[in-house]
Every structure is written in structure tokens, then in C-alpha cells.
Image (tube, coloured by chain):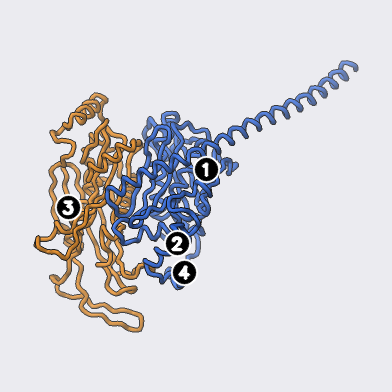
Amino acid sequence: MAGLLLSSTEKVFIVHGVQEDFRSDGRSNIDYRPMELETDVVSHASGSARLRLANTDILVGIKTEIDTPKPDKPDMGKIEFLVDGSANATPEFEGRGGENLASSISNTMQRAYHSSQAFDLKQLCIVEGKQCWKLYVDILILECGGNWFDAVSLATKAALFNTRIPLVKALLMDGGNVDLQLSDDPYDFKFLDVGSAPLLVTLCKIGEKCVVDPSAEEESCSVISLIVGITGNSKSYCADKGASNITDVDIKCSTISMNGPGSLAPKTLKNAIHQGM
Amino acid sequence: MPLDFRRFNGPEDSVSYKIYTKDYLKTYDEQLKDLYDENGKRKDGRELNEARSMCMFFARTDMVSQAKGSAYVELRKTKVVCSVFDPREIPHQNEFRQLGQLYCEVKFAPFSCPRKRRPYVPDVEEKALSVALRQALEPAVCRHFFPNYQIDVLIYILEHDGSCLAAAINAAGLALANAAVPMFDIITSCSVAVIGNKMFIDPTEIEEHIAKNSTEVNHGIITMSVLSQLKQISDFTQIGSMDVECVTKVMEVLLKECEIIVPNIQRVLVVDVVKNFELKKHLEAETKKREEILKKKMDEWRSLLNGQ
């Protein structure tokens, strides 16, 4: 992607390096690039985060709105993802150019957060069947440096962690209509439980080996990459290690998808999934 | 939901009448029990590990006369039509691309889904299926044979009873072969719904719905498509939450299932080729007859002219 022109010699160099577990910036196949994460950067959003993963820059803002829950899921809130590739990132994103990439990222995120074990939508319920919170997660791609899926999922998890949901102080039931009164105090809110929110890990197949966190040059050398969404273990996010009321959950896959015009042998797929875990 | 501006939209807060039926108010456990009885047979009589491709599979090509290639696949109640058109220039294209492109579009008929009416405007689910279909077909098609062109693969789902993506990929593979698009291998696809410790191969819509919204430890749907001879997986999508052992187990099962479908597809293609050959012979015989008649007439006129 992104107007990179690599000569075939450079590609061969990268492929050979990966075979030896040595990448062009000195990392091994399973090392991540240094990342900077900052939360609460956007003052008007209920929650926000900005992630810099070497050259990739993602900004996530979360808005909360009150909505009626779906009739077949009366006690669950809603979460909706929108990915916007700004033309700042690369001239290809100008106008409707970035739509394909944006829709594939938001589809993957929607699938990853679909399961109740990944993100429990029940914590977004206000009045069962009548009112619930709806979270609009808006993801902005500011700069392209390879490896969007990982960066987007990391930034989203941080932004969700930072999201402040106002507390409901009073409820007036008026013959089917509900009148809410939210607390006026700006410090009166609750946080969401994002311990098990999924993180996406991209494994890029270069030559025979799989590489984690590919840079833009490495991405252009590979034909296929595998994206695994892994839900975390809530327990490891507790400050108090003695808490026993949160069940110990094994890490699980919440979504797996493939990206790129290639194909994998079954054994490679299995190894890659294990590596992602 | 983007509004459809071509027609007069009814009030937005209309809901399906089904949420008021007794079926709807069943708890999750009751719904789960409904899926299979004590013998382990599913609601439509299949075993847990029996795919519809064995007993209720129907496929044929040459469905759409206007398309270069087309296919119709029926998995019991799931019905899918696919048409493939000639390569054409890529619209809105500035740069030269070495490899041909595939433009895939999946559309649900508005009356196809049991739970609600599908809007006319393509929604998120249809776009996601289109992307998944493209992802699955790209490694199978020899794209270097039509550089800078695109081939349209258009899928229309007439009735949705589970395994839509799998049926769509099978139909698209057949239609591409019927359209004489050069391909590396036959592509087949299958899906599995996991609920707890039970695996439902080739799930129906109800099974899929329960699998997606289950709260058990392992739940979800996996769809996989395989290039059979090359033994490569061209697309693998999973939704839900399951641990690694479950995923690897399901992958083994799916590999086997996809292999089982291959003879069915091959049979359909062979029938197609045989039919084309016979048609060609028939046409040649007819042409010969007509030429005979014309020749006779020509000789008559010639003799007349010479006689004059």
C-alpha cells in the first residue's frame, strides 16, 4: 500500500532476513515496534486515545448516546465502529479511495466485539427494553506505517478504557415513556469493563515464516496475512491480585480473518494462530 | 441505516411481527434443546456432522442466459445464484495494474431472511460478505491473464437458511469455471457452528443465530474455503469466541468437509462440458444439413441461368 516502491532486490533482502528471524530494523519476528499511547486527548468525546506505533498514527474518539435497544436483545447496549482514512495518511485515501480499507477494518472490529465474552454489552443497559447506551467508536487513521489492524484495536481498547459513562440519577416512568435524569456532576461517572476486550494480532506471511507487526515495507513483500483477535483475561487487569470473584478465563480467539490475495497451507495457518496467541 | 430514497419508506419503527410470537420468548436453553433431539439428530433430520452437501445439494450451471457464466447452488433451503461477466475495463482507474481484479458483489433478496426484511441499499453485512468472497476467490483465479481488467462476480441470495457465504463461494467457483475464466483450482467452502462442545456442520439459520449469540464458553461460526488440489486455504473467517484447540479441531473437520464437496462440483462441470460438446455436434449436423439445402438451390439456379 501507500505509494511504496520497493525494488525486487530489496524484497529479496527482506525475505531472506525474515527467514533468519532478523528484520530490517533489528527486530525478531515476534517483536513489536515501540508504541506510545495517550488517552483523554479529545475533550468533547466521552473517551479517546491516540496511539503511535512507529509510523502508524491512530486517533480514536468515543461518543455515547442514548438509544432504544434492539427488540430481540432488550438488555444489551450497542456499539458501532466507523473507520475513516484521512487523506493525510496517503493520497490514495483522498475522497472515496480509502473506503475499502476502512470498511474491512470496521468489519473486523465489529466481528471481534460481537461476542458477549469479548465485550459485554449488558453493562451498557439502562432500562431493559427501553433505553440503553450506544457507543459510537470513531477511528481516524492519521498516518500509514503498516499494521493497521493491531494499532486500531489497541487504540480502541485504550479509548474504551478511558470512556466515561454518566450515571443515571433519576428515572421517571410515564406510561411507557421513560424520562432520564443524568447526574450533573462531571466527576460522577462509571467506567466500562474492558478487561476482555479483544486485541487484533496481524501475522504477515513473508516467505516461509510469519512476522508480527509488519512495517509498510514488509507488508508489500507479503501476499497474505492472518488477523487473529484475542480476548484477554480480565484477572490480569485487576489492581487487587487477591480478587477471586472474577473468573479466570483462558485467552480465546474472538475473530480470525485473512487479508490479501494469497492463500495458506493448513499447517501454516495452524502455526500462525498458535504464534499469534 | 441509510434510507432508500427511491421508494417511499414506511414508518421507521416497524418491527417484525415475529417478536410477538411464542417462539421468540423461549429462553436460550429451550432454543438450544430445540435444535436437536435425544438421538442427536438435528431439526431437519441430519446428524450433527452431516453436511447438506451430501444429501440436499443441488447445483447447475448455465442458469442465466445473458451472463458469460452462471451457477445456481441449492443447499436444501439456502438458494444462491451467481453470474460472471466478461472482463471489462476497471472504472475510475488511473494506474496500470499487473493483475486483473475481481469485483464481487453479494446481495440478499429482500424476502430472503427469516427475521426481517432486507433493505434495498447494501448494508454492512452484504459488504462484509462481498469482501470475504473476494478474499476467497482471488487466489483461485489466474489474474495474470487479464491485466488491468476486472471480472464481475455477482451473487444473489434468494433464500437464506444458513451457510450463505459457503454456498456463495461454491456458486462463484462454479460460475467462474462455467465462464471459462482460467483458474488454478476448484474452490469449495464449508462452515461450522460451534455451541459449547457441539459442532454443527453446515448450520441452518437458526443454528447460526444461536451460535452467534450464545453465552457458552465456546461459541461461534467458522467458514473456510479451500483450493482442493493445491491443499491451500484461501479464506478463513471466524466470529464468536473459542479457544485455540477448538479452532484447530474445527479446521480439521472443515478441511475434510470441503474435500467431500469436490466430486459434486466436478460432476456438475463434467455434465456441463459434455452438454456443450453434444450441443456443438448437434449444431454442426444442422449446419451441414442447411448447407446441403443451400447448395442444391444454388445448383438449381446455376443450371437455370446457364440454360437461359
Amino acid under label 3? Arg
Disc on the earlier residue, 1 or 4? 4
Q: Is residue B167 above or below residue A176?
A: above
Closer to the observer: label 4 or label 2?
2
Amino acid under label 4? Lys
Amino acid under label 1? Ser
Q: Position of residue B145 (x, y in %)?
A: 44, 28
Do the residues marked 1 and 2 share a common chain? yes
* B66 vs B275, nearest the viewer: B275
Q: CA separation, marks 1 and 3?
A: 45 Å
- Location of residue B285 by image quarter: top right
Residue plotted at (16% across, 31% down): A22
* A92 vs A108, nearest the viewer: A108
Do the residues marked 3 and 2 share a common chain? no
* A74 vs B203, nearest the viewer: B203
Residue that sits furthest to the right in the current view:
B308
Neighbourhood count class around disc 3 (C-alpha, 10 Å): few under 14, some 14–19, many 20 upward: many
Disc on the earlier residue, 1 or 2? 2
Task: Quickly name the residue at label 3.
Answer: A50
Task: Quickly name the residue at label 2.
Answer: B37
The chain painted orange is: A
Neighbourhood count class around disc 2 (C-alpha, 10 Å): few under 14, some 14–19, many 20 upward: few
